[in-house]
Image (cartoon, helix red, strand yellow):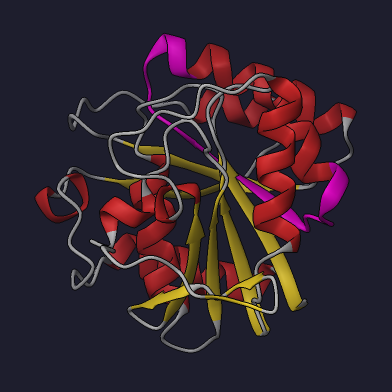
Amino acid sequence: MAIKKIIAFGSAKGGVGKSSITASIAISLSKKCKVGILDADIYGPNQNILFSIKEKPIIKNKLIKPIIKNNIEITSMGLILENDVAATWRGPMLSGAIKQLIHSTDWGELDYLLIDMPPGTGDAYLTIFNELEVDNFILINTSHILSLADSNRTISMLNKLNVNILGYIENNIFNAGKKTINFFETKRINKLATYSFHERIYNFDPEFNCEESNDVAKKIYEMT
């Protein structure tokens, strides 16, 4: 793999819009850079759904060729398993599947590899940070108290693993107007953006030119 920068997007809380925002930022970055997405959520892969990928990846010389959509190279367990098949795997099998996606994907030359992390702080995180040199982590959260509580757990884990936190994104899904800045200020974590509700993010449209994602992409250029 010849990847210049690896950025993971995550939150211990599910349902905060992480996959959609990761995909949207990838689209913004791809306007100037070569970008890939690793969908690391083995139990609930979403990137294949967001980009409406129907075809199966080609395997050549034991390497998986990423599917290219919107000028983005994408690999996901959702491209390998059938849509109606659940991955009911224990920890070792989960870790093995993630390792396979990491080491058996023929990424080629990339400026940025974005990792769509699964919810939680368990085996998947440990495997990814052990197998890849992740340069930065971007937290995605809502202003809900449960989202903030789980973000706190994610921050604790990242600090233990010495993973740099580039900043956080607040997804104001319901335009609730609540602010989370005080929580993150105490952690000395920079705010990268607040996403207001967009129908074309909520029901993901790969052709949507999202201003917030363009702004985050610009900050990623400048900060990395």
Q: Residue 205, image x and y in percent?
A: 17, 62
Q: Front-most of 56 and 155?
A: 56
Q: On the rendered structure, is 93 left or right of 173?
A: right
Q: Quadrant of the C terminus?
A: bottom right
Q: Residue 152, image x and y in percent?
A: 64, 18
Give above or below for 191 relative to 54. Answer: above
Picture residue at 30% right of the left edge, 42% below the top: 83
Q: On the rendered structure, is 170 left or right of 219?
A: left
Picture residue at 54% right of the left edge, 24% below the top: 182
Q: Is residue 27 visible?
A: yes
Q: Front-most of 33 and 186?
A: 33
Find the magenta span and give its range. 130-147
Picture residue at 66% right of the left edge, 76% below the top: 106
Give above or below for 13 relative to 145. Answer: below
Q: Residue 3, image x and y in percent?
A: 74, 76
Give above or below for 184 relative to 193. Answer: above
Q: Quadrant of the N terminus?
A: bottom right
Q: Is residue 105 magenta?
A: no
Q: On the rendered structure, is 90 left or right of 69?
A: right
